[in-house]
Image (spheres, rainbow, N blue to C red):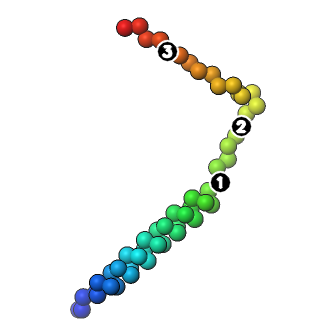
Amino acid sequence: MPQMAPMSWVTLFLFFSFMLLMINMMNYYSFTPKFKLSDSKKTITKKINNWMW
């Protein structure tokens, strides 16, 4: 069985790298997060813990 030429390996590597990038970009841009903003919690509450050593 003949071995694969190195140029063919480079072509396969570039093809699969391109496909990986395209699939990741499509997944990233097709996801739309749904943020639920409540009107009752407009202020940010901060809890401060003072530790006495």
Question: Which sits earlier in the primary sequence, circle 1 or circle 2?
Answer: 1
Secondary structure beneath label 2: loop
Residue 17 picture location, percent across and down: 43, 71
What is the spatial separation of the Cα atoms under label 1 and label 3, in whole angstroms? 37 Å
Residue holding disc 1: 32
Task: Name the amino acid type tagged 2.
Answer: Leu
Q: Are marks 1 and 3 in contact (CB under 8 Å)?
A: no
Residue with the most extreme top position: 52
Q: In this view, which residue lies farthest toward the bottom?
A: 2
The residue indicated by pointer 3 is 49
Say which residue appears at 51% left-offset and 63% top-offset: 24
Q: Which corner quadrant of the image does residue 26 belong to?
A: bottom right
- Around disc 2, counting alpha carbons within 10 Å, would you say few (fewer than 14), some (14 to 19), or many (20 or more)? few
Instruction: Please determine whether, in this image, residue 14 is positioned above or below residue 32.
Output: below
Residue flagged by tag 1: what amino acid is it? Thr
Q: Could you tell whether 14 is left or right of 1 in the image? A: right
Report if the CB atoms under discs 1 and 2 are less than 8 Å apart.
no
Figure quadrant of the C terminus? top left
Which circle's residue, 1 or 3, is located before the other in the chain?
A: 1
Residue type, mark 3 in image: Asn
Q: Residue at x 24, y 88 (%)?
A: 3
Looking at the picture, does residue 41 appear above or below residue 28? Answer: above
Residue 21 vs 13, above or below: the answer is: above
Q: Which residue is mark 2?
A: 37
